[in-house]
Image (tube, rainbow, N blue to C red):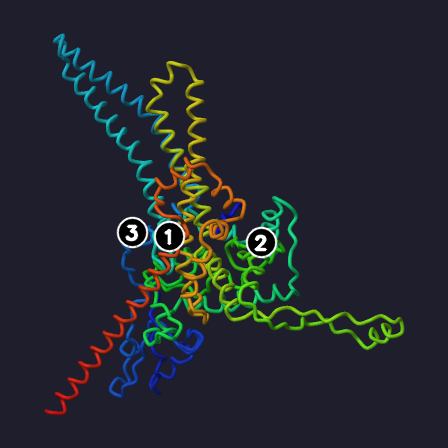
């Protein structure tokens, strides 16, 4: 349930070694020696055969400065990438395209006029070689300017797209995020701390003021404990090769562990990281990744008391609680109604002092009744973990930033450029009917842009939902839950109930389910050939089957290596 966001250097040598013959230089060297007893650029020898010689013979002087090898455009690339990877770059490309569309007709008309002049001169026989050369030179210059004007916005646009391309962690899917690290940090700063609760409160209050479950409620504690259990395995996704080497040895009766991902989880780049990399590359040094954790855990949590809503959604991005999950009590009631344990647990009571107890006895007040609640079973906790792992995967993969970038920046910018080009091409026709026709076409372009953005948002959401299911299986396996239960979980929630569970909010899911057949036909044309529930379950099954295939292949490789080592040992023993 993904909810989009609304808002050179000197060489260091060994310590100085001073013989008695050069004791009189020790005071001078000590005054110039840096902290730690090390000197830079001077080696004093201590061989007896050199005693009595001047200091110049005893010192091996190194070059204090050296020429740094040139980096062939390497420092320039991070600068260009940092400049192009910003939300304003696409608007710059659009402005460049508008300037091009303004001057291109003028250049074409002037070249057409110059060619017409040359043809008239040849036809009348009034050919002036000097004039002809001048006209041809102007045509060539204008042609060069024409190609340059066309090339600049095209290169700027594709360079922006290339700078925004990145691999999704754990799955390796290519995606576009046209937000600079500074812009991502601003978003995270706005949502950090109480900002997340304020933003989510505004979302939940669109229909009616929400009723929240108290953090002291046992249901909230149950959800929070399960969420924290899943959060603790997020660092494992960064180093699965090192932390989970035993994934090959899982037996059929064990919880299957995933093979290490080809694209491990990596933190989102920061603005300071780009500056550090630029400085290291400029100094011709090896760039090492900065050690910092994945922004997010511990995530914020809200449990809304709404029995008629059996779903949840995630929201936000960044550390300090800037991302979190909202769970509705209807889902908890549904899970607790299945496979009840039949065992009740006494809820913790507030401890009262002896003075309070004495006053109650004097006034004849009875003690508060003992409250009980059902003890969640392991099966019920597993179902809760499946839903929470799905929402947690959205936050870990930064799907909200991707949705914000594609829905608010990339697709509107691309469609705006396409609309400008179309209006420029048909302007010779529309100018005959006055400015109102052109304005009407601009309005139609805005409406079409809005509808197309909705379709792209749906397609992006569908891809992200499947991706979140796949990554949630990894979270479940590392946290000690059987990911095979997720297949049964999503199969049970097929049809309407699944759709209400997977989308951003209940209102969005209901709108998509009640839309006319024409809109559903357009979505199928955009790439959906199966219902969303069937697609998700099939993709999850394929992922678990891939785990098993890679496990069997790894085992066969290990067995083959063991056999080869045994044969080598036998051959050596015979020799």
| Residue 120 falls left or right of residue 197 | left
Please tell me whether mark 3 or mark 1 is closer to you in this view. Answer: 1
Which of these two is toward me, 134 or 268? 268
Helix, strand, or loop for circle 2?
Answer: helix
Label 1 Cα neighbours within 10 Å, binned few <14 / some 14-19 / many ≥20: some
Q: Quadrant of the C terminus?
A: bottom left
- Mark 2 or mark 3: name the one nearer the start of the chain: 3
Q: Assign a secondary structure to mark 1.
A: helix
Q: Choose mark 1 or mark 2, whichever is in front.
A: 1
Q: In the drawing, what numbered circle is on residue 116?
A: none
Residue 122 is situated, as x and y percent measured from the top left of the image, at: 13, 12
Residue at mark 1 to residue at mark 2: CA–CA distance: 32 Å
Q: Earlier in the sequence, mark 3 or mark 1?
A: 3
Which of the two residues, 373 or 34, is positioned nearer the viewer here?
373
Distance from disc 3 to disc 1, alpha carbons, whole Å, reads 45 Å
Mark 2 surroundings: few (<14), some (14-19) or many (≥20) residues within 10 A = many
Q: Is residue 138 above or below residue 8?
A: above
Asked if 545 appears above or below 128 in the picture, the reply is: below
User: Considering depth in this image, is 53 or 107 the residue closer to the camera?
Assistant: 107
Residue farthest to the bottom, as pictured: 574
At 40% across and 81% down in the image, what residue appears?
26
Whether pointer 3 and pointer 1 mark residues with C-beta atoms closer than 8 Å, the reply is no
Q: Which residue is mark 3?
A: 73
Q: Quadrant of residue 253?
A: bottom left
The answer to whether any part of residue 490 appears in the image is yes
Query: What residue did someone put label 1 on?
Result: 535
Q: Which percent across, then down, holds residue 58? A: 29, 79
């Amino acid at each position: 349930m993904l909810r989009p966001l609304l808002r050179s250097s000197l060489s260091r040598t060994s310590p100085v070694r001073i013989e008695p013959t050069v004791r009189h230089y020790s005071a001078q060297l000590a005054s110039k020696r840096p902290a730690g007893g090390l000197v830079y650029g001077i080696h004093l020898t201590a061989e007896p055969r050199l005693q009595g010689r001047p200091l110049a013979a005893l010192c091996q002087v190194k070059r204090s400065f050296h020429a740094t090898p040139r980096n062939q455009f390497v420092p320039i690339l991070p600068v260009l990438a940092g400049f192009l990877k910003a939300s304003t770059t696409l608007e710059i490309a659009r402005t460049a395209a508008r300037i091009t569309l303004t001057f291109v007709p003028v250049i074409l008309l002037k070249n057409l006029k110059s060619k017409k002049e040359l043809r008239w001169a040849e036809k009348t026989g009034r050919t002036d070689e000097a004039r002809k050369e001048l006209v041809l030179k102007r045509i060539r210059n204008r042609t060069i300017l024409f190609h340059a004007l066309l090339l600049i916005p095209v290169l700027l646009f594709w360079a922006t797209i290339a700078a925004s391309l990145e691999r999704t962690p754990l799955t390796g899917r290519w995606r576009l995020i046209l937000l600079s690290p500074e812009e991502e940090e601003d978003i995270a700063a706005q949502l950090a701390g109480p900002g997340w609760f304020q933003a989510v409160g505004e979302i939940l209050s669109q229909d009616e003021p929400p009723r929240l479950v108290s953090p002291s409620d046992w249901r909230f504690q149950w959800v929070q404990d399960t969420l924290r259990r899943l959060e603790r395995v997020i660092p494992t996704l960064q180093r699965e090769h090192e932390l989970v080497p035993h994934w090959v040895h899982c037996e059929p009766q064990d919880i299957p562990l995933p093979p290490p991902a080809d694209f491990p989880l990596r933190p989102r780049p920061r603005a300071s990281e780009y500056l550090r990399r630029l400085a290291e590359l400029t100094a011709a040094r090896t760039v090492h990744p900065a050690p910092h954790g994945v922004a997010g855990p511990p995530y914020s949590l809200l449990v809304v008391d709404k029995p008629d809503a059996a779903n949840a959604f995630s929201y936000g991005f960044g550390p300090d609680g800037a991302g979190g999950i909202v769970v509705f009590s209807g889902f908890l009631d549904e899970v607790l109604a299945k496979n009840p344990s039949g065992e009740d647990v006494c809820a913790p009571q507030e401890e009262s002092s002896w003075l309070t107890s004495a006053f109650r006895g004097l006034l004849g007040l009875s003690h508060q009744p003992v409250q009980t609640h059902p003890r969640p079973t392991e099966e019920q906790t597993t179902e809760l973990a499946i839903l929470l792992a799905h929402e947690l995967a959205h936050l870990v993969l930064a799907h909200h930033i991707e949705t914000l970038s594609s829905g608010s920046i990339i697709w509107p910018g691309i469609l705006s450029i396409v609309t400008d080009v179309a209006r420029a091409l048909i302007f010779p026709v529309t100018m005959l009917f006055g400015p109102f026709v052109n304005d009407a076409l601009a309005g139609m372009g805005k409406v079409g842009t809005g509808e197309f953005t909705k379709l792209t948002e749906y397609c992006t959401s569908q891809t992200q939902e499947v991706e979140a299911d796949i990554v949630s299986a990894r979270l479940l396996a590392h946290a000690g839950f059987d990911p095979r239960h997720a297949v049964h979980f999503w199969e049970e929630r097929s049809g309407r109930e699944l759709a209400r569970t997977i989308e951003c909010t209940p209102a969005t899911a209901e709108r998509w389910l009640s839309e006319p057949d024409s809109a559903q036909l357009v979505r199928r044309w955009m790439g959906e050939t199966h219902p969303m529930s069937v697609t998700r379950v099939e993709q999850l099954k394929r992922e678990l089957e891939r785990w098993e295939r890679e496990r069997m292949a790894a085992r066969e490789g290990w067995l083959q290596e063991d056999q080869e080592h045994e044969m080598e040992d036998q051959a050596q023993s015979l020799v």
